[in-house]
């Protein structure tokens, strides 16, 4: 999607937002979203995600900077002419209309003929598995059903741009996974550009072309899912995305793209310097649980290893999740595949662990 993203169908250019004239809830947002791209905003509560969607929808104005849609400033396009489908966190359906009328409404506004309208409404209702509910009013539906109707209404007119704020939050796991599949399929088939907000990391990683991780009104990292998970740029992103082990220490040396880090307990480990640049700096090193090795034969002969004590072993079916005490950290987790050659570790056992320096990233303290 990188080539598409350069064309910038949606562009946030140095956008800032303050509601009270004092504190900025969006601090300096630069983001270019390609036509047909599926971009997800992920971040803690209050980090500014909904605010960004509201500005893009034209319901809030940016305090500074510009938002462009297809090259034109959004403020110059009236809301009903923007061709944006939306599902907001509390986006109410029209209570006096039936489900079918709610869905037909955006099509009527676009002056679509009756037959085509009915066909599209039926398809949208089938997509959200609500085909039998066309005659009901919103008040006669459960929360999850209302949410599905709101989703269908946002997509029924095949908009060029769709904004979705936690559109699947009220659904059970199975329905949620089904809808994740339907949304991404429809978005890709129709070439819809999607800006999606979720708290669910798995949802973000599986659905998106790129994910923007927000914290405190800024994008901390913007990257495709695999890059975000495997190469987090800072400690916040490493902690926020997926399970992660952190060890703290001081950089002892950096040579040929390798950092030696002396942990606070005195042990020395190899790491890849990511945002440390010189000896003496404090760092948090980050290692994913599935990249830690305890089978000595599989470790590099000159790899630095750490002593560890097994505290807990959890059998999870496909994987084993083992918690260790490592360099004073009692929440150090390793995950291993349930394979014939993997041993089940026992609480109390003393082992040695290690990893490839590439998998251990020295980040900001
Ligand atoms: N209308 C408003 N007036 C004043 N402050 C607001 C308003 N809407 C949001 N805020 C504040 O702006 C900040 C960002 O809010 P926003 O709703 O964008 O967060 P969010 O990332 O969507 O959070 P969540 O994940 O909880 O939905 C928060 O501190 C919030 O309290
Ligand atoms: Mg929100």
Image (tube, rainbow, N blue to C red):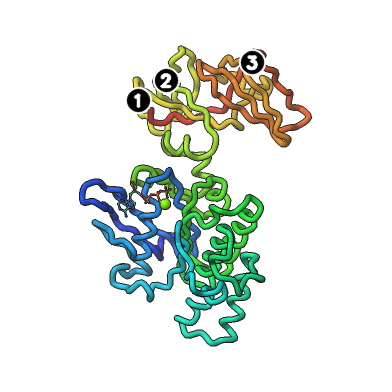
Residue found at the far left of this picture: 21
Residue pointed to by mark 1: 278
356 or 148, nearer to the observer = 148
Residue at the image position 44 percent from the left and 25 percent from the top: 259
**Nearest to viewer (mark 2 / mark 1):** 2
Depth order, front residue of 188/54: 54
Which residue is the extreme one toward the right? 340
Residue 15 placement, left or right of 354: left
The picture places residue 252, in percent across and down from the top left corner, at 40, 18
**Disc number for residue 351:** 3
Which residue in the protein does label 2 denote?
249
- Going 48% across and 76% down the picture, which residue do you hit? 106
Disc 3 Cβ-to-ligand 1 distance below 8 Å = no
Mark 2 or mark 1: name the one nearer the start of the chain. Answer: 2
Q: Tell which tag, 3 or 1, sits nearer the viewer.
A: 3
Q: Is mark 3 on a helix, strand or loop?
A: strand
Q: How far apart are marks 3 and 2 (CA)?
A: 22 Å
Front one among 73 and 279: 73
Q: Which callout, 3 or 1, points at the residue further toward the start of the chain?
A: 1
Q: Where is residue 213 in the image (x, y as percent from the top left)?
A: 43, 46
Q: Where is residue 140 in the image (x, y as percent from the top left)?
A: 58, 65
Residue 7 picture quarter? bottom left
Q: Quadrant of residue 331?
A: top right
Q: Position of residue 319 (x, y in %)?
A: 69, 33
| Distance from the alpha carbon under mark 2 to that under mark 1 | 13 Å
Mark 2 burial class by Cα count in 10 Å: few <14, some 14-19, many 20+:
many
- 334 in relation to 101, above or below: above
Cα separation between marks 3 and 1: 32 Å
The quadrant of the picture occupied by the C terminus is top left
Which label is found at residue 301? Answer: none
The answer to which of 331 and 237 lies nearer the viewer is 331
């Amino acid at each position: 999607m990188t080539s598409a993203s350069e064309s910038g169908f949606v562009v946030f250019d140095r956008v800032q937002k303050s509601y009270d004239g004092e504190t900025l809830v969006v601090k300096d947002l630069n983001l270019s979203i390609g036509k047909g791209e599926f971009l997800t905003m992920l971040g803690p509560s209050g980090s500014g995600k909904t605010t960004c969607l509201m500005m893009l929808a034209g319901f809030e104005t940016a305090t500074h900077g510009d938002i462009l849609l297809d090259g034109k400033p959004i403020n110059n396009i009236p809301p009903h002419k923007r061709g944006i489908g939306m599902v907001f966190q509390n986006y109410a359906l029209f209570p006096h209309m039936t489900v079918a009328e709610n869905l037909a409404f955006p099509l009527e506004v676009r002056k679509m003929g009756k037959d085509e309208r009915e066909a599209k409404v039926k398809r949208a209702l089938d997509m959200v598995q609500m085909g039998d509910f066309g005659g009901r009013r919103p008040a006669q539906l459960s929360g999850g059903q209302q949410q599905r109707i709101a989703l269908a209404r946002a997509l029924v007119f095949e908009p060029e741009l769709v904004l979705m704020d936690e559109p699947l939050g009220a659904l059970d796991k199975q329905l949620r996974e089904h809808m994740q599949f339907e949304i991404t399929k429809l978005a890709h088939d129709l070439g819809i550009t999607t800006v999606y907000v979720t708290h669910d990391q798995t949802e973000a990683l599986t659905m998106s072309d790129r994910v923007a991780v927000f914290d405190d009104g800024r994008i901390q990292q913007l990257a495709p899912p695999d890059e975000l998970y495997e190469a987090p740029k800072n400690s916040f992103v490493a902690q926020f995305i997926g399970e992660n082990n952190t060890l703290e220490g001081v950089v002892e040396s950096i040579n040929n793209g390798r950092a030696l880090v002396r942990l606070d307990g005195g042990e020395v480990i190899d790491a890849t310097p990511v945002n440390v640049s010189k000896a003496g700096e404090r760092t948090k090193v980050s290692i994913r649980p599935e990249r830690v090795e305890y089978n000595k034969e599989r470790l590099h002969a000159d790899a630095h290893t750490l002593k560890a004590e097994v505290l807990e072993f959890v059998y999870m079916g496909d994987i084993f999740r083992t918690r260790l005490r490592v360099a004073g950290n009692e929440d150090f987790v390793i995950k291993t595949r349930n394979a014939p050659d993997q041993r089940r570790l026992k609480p109390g056992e003393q082992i040695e662990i290690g990893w490839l320096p590439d998998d251990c990233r020295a980040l900001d303290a």
